[in-house]
Amino acid sequence: MSESFRVIDVDVHNEQNDSAFVPYLPEPWKSRVAASGIGMAGSGYYSPVGVLRRDSVPPGGGKAGSDPEFMLKQLVEAYNMDYAILTGVIYNISATHDADFAAAICSAYNDYLIAEWLSKSSKFKGAMAVATQDPYLAAREIDRIGGHPDIVEVIISSAARMPLGQRYYHPIYEACERNGLPLAIHPGAEGAGSSTPPTAAGYPSRYIEWHTCLSQMFMTHLVSMVCEGVFVKYPNLKVVLTEGGIAWLPGLMWRLDKNYKALRSTVPWLTRLPSEYIREHCYLSTQPIEEPDDPQHLVDLFNMIDAENILMFSSDYPHWDFDAPTQILRKLKPEAKRKIFAENARALYKLP
Amino acid sequence: MSESFRVIDVDVHNEQNDSAFVPYLPEPWKSRVAASGIGMAGSGYYSPVGVLRRDSVPPGGGKAGSDPEFMLKQLVEAYNMDYAILTGVIYNISATHDADFAAAICSAYNDYLIAEWLSKSSKFKGAMAVATQDPYLAAREIDRIGGHPDIVEVIISSAARMPLGQRYYHPIYEACERNGLPLAIHPGAEGAGSSTPPTAAGYPSRYIEWHTCLSQMFMTHLVSMVCEGVFVKYPNLKVVLTEGGIAWLPGLMWRLDKNYKALRSTVPWLTRLPSEYIREHCYLSTQPIEEPDDPQHLVDLFNMIDAENILMFSSDYPHWDFDAPTQILRKLKPEAKRKIFAENARALYKLP
């Protein structure tokens, strides 16, 4: 790999068994998890290829993605990455019913993340997790941990009970802004537990449908955040739409801008076109990148969204649909490649 | 307008007051509607500009779009249209709870449509409405009315209790195929009555959000119809995605095709890429057409979806966001214009 090809991977899933949480949990949760595990609500959709790379199981055994040393070797060093942003998977707890339990699990995870991952390499940076069931507890957790120098982001689930722009959630955004942290939104628990059904038309039958439709949550959340005035109320908030796909964005911006022209009296706090707020406040991660047969279509898509300035590379390691930085977007022009693969993330996360 | 510019408008909403149904209803529904109206379930989302063109109220008064003579003058003759496909608005009844009532309302509407609209001009062609609460009653209605020479399509609501590909709905598709009628799917009742919430993440706050997110229902239905094998089981079925937007389609096809390559063991009845079924079986109506600032983006979008062969012009008359055939897509090449504005519809609906 060329020395000048810098890579920051903004969506790396450090996995762990439930037992990893036990030392970091207070009672009564410690005994519960020690005895029965976390008991995360699951959507029930089944992937016939699994959801983890089989070759990412560490040599000593355990879950794929659960060993910091092996992750450094198989991902960070193999692709000569500057940084890997560790996103975990515990954001999915937001679909589980008990708000206090979910908040305790996130706090335990954040302490575990700092102690057992971020301390292992300066190339690991952390997305701290908060649960959305109680936005005031989430804000308190952001204030507790958000100032740690290796925490660069707050991550929440895209699975939710209502669109993420609604006022219920605003304490989370206020805390992100107060702590200077971008907010990442990640899919995974759509249709599980207390989440809405995973698509606008309810529950599809199988994983291929569920996975293909995951972008819908992001569409609703983005429209909601813009129209509820989140970016007016929190002008320094940045949002990272992680693993939500990309190709739906141009149509959404065009349709929302067009509707705004006729219907803006119902969103009087917006003083600019909705797409301008999106372009100013939002980033999208690349994986799973769309792969049209005709590569020109991807070029056209990138022009529509000014990809150079809003995309950030992600591999989704160690998940089944991992994108290697050497395999995707090989035909980008050098300046676009530099920004998408590293510099947009470096600026957003204030990394050296 | 040039003599050679032919126009077929595939989404024209003939409106009517509830009292119009009364003569066509049997008891006990006749007395109910005469006394209290239909009592359609409504979503509660409010458009500050209304949903009907104010200049489309007939000279004699009544609802915009409710007078055949005035519609012929203001729409069909004004734009020298070959045909207007009358889609009504009664498909929205599918979100109302009582399946027998919904079926009776649709039957009354279909008789009213034939008697009071299709008889008035050979330029009017009809989309017969069926309710999706009881697919067997819907199939019976398609067999009852579908053979009428001026009925060219069956129309159902995109608001639904579950994705439209699921087996529950198949009797409707079987009846469409048996009668040689395309199936149109139209939004309007999303979030009303027994419909799912209107977006994947639940209920947004206002009309601009609701309207911008309407495409999500179509995304789910299309993925579901392909993955459930509807187009394998009913190889002659054609589906018209009416008023659902366009720009979401390329991304959906790319993502679904990519997922199919990894996950096809769960949809073994598919023998080709999902996008191939979509291209072979589906049409999209144009209104509300996306309007990017940069017109090249629309050209690029059209290339991605082979617009020339799957789009059909619609005005959505007399709704607030009406698109005049003289105002949109003016820069299309002649062959694409000919097909999108008339010939795709002429072939699909077997019109002279």
Image: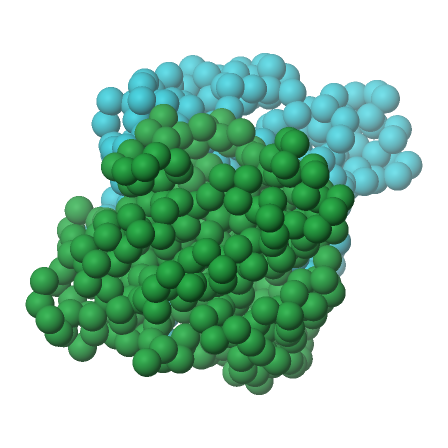
Chain colours: A green, B cyan
Give the quadrant of residue B180. Answer: top left
Residue lying furthest left in this view?
A: A2
Q: Is residue B332 visible?
A: no
Residue B281 % position (x, y) = 33, 32
Q: Is residue B180 above or below residue A123?
A: above
Residue B201 % position (x, y) = 60, 50
Give the quadrant of residue A315. Answer: bottom left
Label tally: 0
Residue at the spot 49% in from the left edge and 30% down from the top edge: A45
* Left or right: residue B243 compared with residue A231: left
- Location of the N terminus of chain B by quadrant is bottom left
Q: Is residue B268 visible?
A: yes
Residue A46 % position (x, y) = 45, 28
Q: Is residue B285 above or below residue A192?
A: below
Give the quadrant of residue B234. Answer: top left
Viewer-side residue, B69 vs A232:
A232
* Left or right: residue B26 compared with residue A303: right
Residue at the spot 28% in from the left edge and 55% down from the top edge: A72
* Left or right: residue B166 compared with residue B351: right
Q: Is residue B151 above or below residue A129?
A: above
Residue A147 % position (x, y) = 56, 76
Residue at the spot 64% in from the left edge and 70% down from the top edge: A144
Viewer-side residue, A25 vs B111:
A25
Residue lying furthest right in this view?
A: B35
Residue at the spot 8% in from the left edge and 67% down from the top edge: A2
